[in-house]
């Protein structure tokens, strides 16, 4: 999965508030995805596991809209269904109002 146990621990701590809620507010889930993807690419499987969410729901409700509005980027931009597709936060987006 993720590079190291320490890094995985950090990611789990970031995701914990979303994992613990059955229905988290959209803004909170999006902000958490942005934080999780700040350090590098995470796959949909990794994000789903960290957030305790179904992959299809995560892709349709969060990942695709965030890709479209430019807040995150795909590792393989021209191959949307690449088996190792990953997503990361676009630099400079998090702090902008």
Image (spheres, helix red, strand yellow):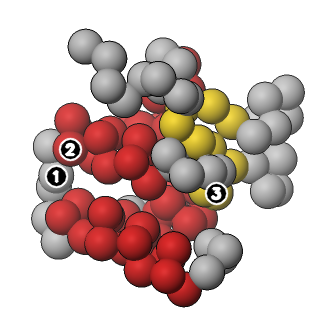
Q: Are marks 2 and 1 in contact (CB under 8 Å)?
A: yes
Instruction: Give left or right: position of 82 versus 59.
Output: right
- Closer to us: 66 or 32: 32
- Closer to us: 86 or 53: 86
Q: Are marks 2 and 3 in contact (CB under 8 Å)?
A: no
- Closer to us: 67 or 71: 71
Circle 2: is it few (<14), some (14-19), or many (20+) Cα within 10 Å?
few
Q: Is residue 4 among the parts visible in the rendering?
A: yes
The residue positioned farthest toward the bottom in the image shown: 5
Nearest to N terminus: mark 2 or mark 3: 2
> Which of the image's four quarters has the C terminus?
top left
Residue at coordinates 44% horizontally, 54% vertically from top-left? Answer: 36
Secondary structure under tag 3 reads strand
Residue at coordinates 20% horizontally, 44% vertically from top-left? Answer: 28
Instruction: Give left or right: position of 59 versus 87.
Output: left
Which residue position is annotated with label 3? 43
Q: How many discs mark residues in the rendered view?
A: 3
Which residue position is annotated with label 2? 28
Vertical comparison of 85 with 50: above or below: above
Q: What mark, if any, has residue 47 been given in the picture?
A: none
Q: Closer to us: mark 2 or mark 1?
A: 2
Instruction: Give left or right: position of 62 versus 43.
Output: left
> Which of the image's four quarters has the N terminus?
bottom right
Q: Position of residue 30 (x, y in %)?
A: 32, 39
| Marks 2 and 3, how far apart at CA | 19 Å
Q: Position of residue 55 (x, y in %)?
A: 51, 57
Which residue position is annotated with label 1? 24
Q: Is residue 64 among the parts visible in the rendering?
A: no
């Amino acid at each position: 999965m993720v590079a190291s146990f320490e890094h995985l621990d950090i990611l789990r701590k970031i995701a914990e508030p979303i994992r613990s809620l059955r229905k988290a507010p959209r803004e909170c889930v999006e902000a958490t995805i942005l934080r999780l993807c700040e350090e590098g690419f995470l796959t949909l499987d990794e994000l789903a596991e960290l957030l305790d969410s179904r992959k299809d729901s995560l892709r349709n409700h969060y990942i695709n809209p965030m890709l479209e509005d430019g807040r995150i980027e795909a590792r393989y931009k021209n191959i949307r269904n690449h088996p190792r597709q990953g997503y990361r936060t676009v630099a400079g987006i998090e702090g902008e109002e």
